[in-house]
Image: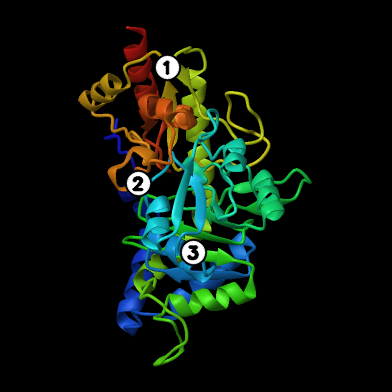
Amino acid sequence: MKKIQMVDLKGQYKDIKEHVDSSIMNVIETTAFINGPDVHEFQKELEEYLGVKHVIPCANGTDALQIAMMALDLKPGDEVITADFTFAATVEVIALLRLTPVLVDVDPINFNIDIDAIKRAITPKTKAIVPVHLFGLVANMDEIMDIAKEHNLYVIEDNAQAIGADYTSKDGTKKKAGTIGHVASTSFFPSKNLGCYGDGGAIFTNDDALAHTIRGIVNHGMYVRYHHDVVGVNSRLDSIQAAVLRAKLPYLDTYNAARRNAARKYSLAFAEIENIITPTGFCDNTQSICDVCDCHVFHQYTLKVVGVDRDALVNHLTEKEIPCGVYYPIPLHLQKAYKDERYNEADFTVTNQLVKEVISLPMHTELDDEQIDFITKTVIDFIEK
């Protein structure tokens, strides 16, 4: 059995090596390193893939979130609601812009932002909601957009983990994750479902005026060289990373299908283990992966282990040379940087329990049956010993 990786970028690269290498060499030979043709072509190709009017590439996913909020002209003190159970970048940019983060609990089944918690958190100061499509599963965007419309709020999708996922609305229409809210951000960090070989990100929107503002912000506030019309930043996707992303984009659906296939095999192996709760899709609240749509693209395959010493399981897997992760071990509302006397522990019962129970297993496009069998047997043996 080949060595198990949490993310096997090298194995993935081998299959597309010729295309990637030639694309990178073309950038080097033309020396079009910044805003070169590959950046513009990638932008167009991703717009077509997503079915969105505007893709604005930038330097990384955190910048993408920050720039999206800057473009909405939110003011210091404006409240922005987001999930407590996610990576810190989501709340980090809210705080950096001197906005007021309002963290709320998540759903115990799918780990995405809790709809009722959003409703309870809205005040006259609320200006935006940031749903995070956590681990690759699209949040309940129908409900979120209804709330936003009722209260005249912006919706900023944090799509760093769910690029390529489909969301089926209650009226039957399908849209790609990141194309439903007013604006969205994504990350092309190497381990993402669509990852480059460095840092990269992008902002998506169907709003022409908002896209124009964003294009100025990412480039020092300039539309014409040395004419600074808005306050901007320096956040550009470099051409080499764009070339890598162009080489990988045609394979994104295949990559996501491979992840879903691996997830199904994991879940089948764990189906009879009472202490293990496997991930579910959005459209059914059963403990199974949705088979009628592609709402989950499994950036992570994350279990809940109940009545099990999760940290001892982590140590056991590590001893067996099986990498794993705990995403995330500390709720955001308990992080030193984001503690606030406004928060009541009783409002975070789900998140406070999840941080004790979740464990993410290896998930990538190169997982094979032998590896999955070994991983699942090792987990089950530990739980049943």
Instruction: Tell me whether the residue at label 2 lies in contact with that at label 3, contact meaning CB atoms closer than 8 angstroms.
Output: no
Instruction: Tell me whether the residue at label 1 lies in contact with that at label 2, contact meaning CB atoms closer than 8 angstroms.
Output: no
Which residue in the protein does label 1 denote? 306
Q: Helix, strand, or loop for circle 3?
A: helix
Which residue in the protein does label 2 denote? 338
Q: Which residue lies at the image location 44% right of the left edge and 51% below the top edge?
A: 101
> Which quarter of the rendered picture does the N terminus lie within?
top left
Instruction: Tell me whether the residue at label 1 lies in contact with that at label 3, contact meaning CB atoms closer than 8 angstroms.
Output: no
Q: Helix, strand, or loop for circle 1?
A: loop
Q: Is the residue marked by circle 1 packed among few (<14), some (14-19), or many (20+) residues within 10 Å?
A: some
Q: Residue 69 carries which label?
A: 3
Q: Which mark is residue 87?
A: none
Q: Residue furthest right?
A: 171
Q: Nearer the viewer, residue 33 or 168?
A: 168
Where is residue 230 shown, x and y percent of the image?
A: 46, 82
User: Quick check: 133 left or right of 353?
Assistant: right
Q: Helix, strand, or loop for circle 2?
A: helix
Q: Is the residue marked by circle 3 packed among few (<14), some (14-19), or many (20+) residues within 10 Å?
A: many
- How far apart are the alpha carbons under marks 1 and 3? 38 Å
Where is residue 137 shown, x and y percent of the image?
A: 54, 41
Q: In this view, does 295 lie above or below 153?
A: above
Q: Which residue lies at the image location 31% right of the left edge and 81% below the top edge?
A: 29
- How far apart are the alpha carbons under marks 1 and 2? 28 Å
Q: Which of marks 1 and 2 is in front?
A: 2
Type of amino acid under label 1? Val
Q: First in sequence, mark 1 or 3: give its number.
A: 3
Residue 169 visible here: yes
Q: Nearer the viewer, mark 1 or mark 3?
A: 3
Q: First in sequence, mark 2 or 3: give its number.
A: 3
Residue 22 found in image quarter: bottom left
